[in-house]
Image (tube, rainbow, N blue to C red):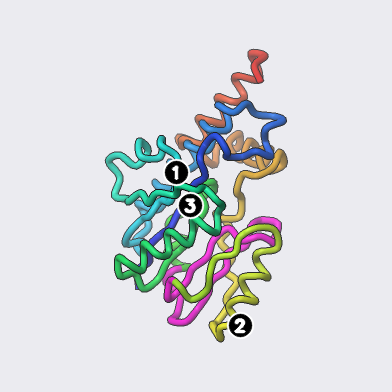
Amino acid sequence: MRATAIVPVKRFGAAKQRLSDVLAPEQRAALAAAMLSDVLEALAEAKLVERVLVVSGEPRVAELLAGRDADLLDDPADAGHSEAALIGVSGAVARGAGCVAVLPGDCPLLKSGELDRAIAAATEGSVGVIPDRHGSGTNGLILRPPDLIGPAFGPGSRERHLRLASEVGAEAVVLRIESLGLDLDTGGDLLELRRIVEAGELHGSATAAAVLALDHAAGTGSR
């Protein structure tokens, strides 16, 4: 079974508000765009991803998708991650998908091979919950079928998704995907991302270039 990947993306101007004390709006936007670009690259390399649906109301996302094998679904309300994921699920079902992988656009470490293994492990009637690096949140959902449960992201969502799966009698599986552990929400996440870039683990990526640009701006006295 191959999966349709759903990537909800907030408008760049509203992205990463918790980093507003350390990054200017244009820096947050540039970083969000760079991370999405790297996520899309990983999805393009995944053998078990048959289709990519990006859900966003951000006009610049269309530019990032130019030349890529991905569809853009409009999210006019930009109401939140769960709401955007539902738009993606509806789009996937309309396209005949039997399985979806709901993934964030801000996990630039994503490795296609790890995602392929997680999709391959998805059985009919299962909910795969991919925790964040703190263990309490959800950085990904693999649903087979796509509308088995409604995505319910946010604080404490790992246990919430497991509970929703139990309520519908689905098999609930916690999937450990290291490359999906780090998303960018807090200053601590940014420090960890900077450490990874400095270690050369994202060499040549769009995210690495964006992080280095932040450091250059800091070195020249810009915020």
Image mark count: 3
Q: Quadrant of the C terminus?
A: top right
Disc 1 residue type (three-letter): Gly
- What residue appears at the point 55 percent right and 59 percent down from the top-left corner? 82
Disc 2 residue type (three-letter): Glu
The residue labelled by disc 1 is 57
Vertical placement of residue 95 versus 80, above or below: below
Residue 129 image offset from top left, x and y in percent: 57, 68
Mark with earlier residue (1, 3): 3
Q: Are marks 1 and 3 in contact (CB under 8 Å)?
A: no
The residue labelled by disc 2 is 167
Mark with earlier residue (2, 1): 1
Q: Are marks 2 and 3 in contact (CB under 8 Å)?
A: no
Disc 3 residue type (three-letter): Pro
The residue labelled by disc 3 is 8
Circle 1: element type: loop
Residue 99 image offset from top left, x and y in percent: 40, 71
Q: Which residues are magenta?
A: 119-146
Is 219 displayed left or right of 125 in the figure?
right
Q: Are marks 2 and 1 in contact (CB under 8 Å)?
A: no
Residue 55 shows in this picture: yes
Q: Which mark is on residue 209?
A: none
- The extreme front residue here reads 77
Mark with earlier residue (2, 3): 3
Vertical placement of residue 217 versus 209, above or below: above
- What residue appears at the point 55 percent right and 24 percent down from the top-left corner? 213
Q: Nearer the viewer, mark 1 or mark 3?
A: 1
Q: Nearer the viewer, mark 2 or mark 1?
A: 1
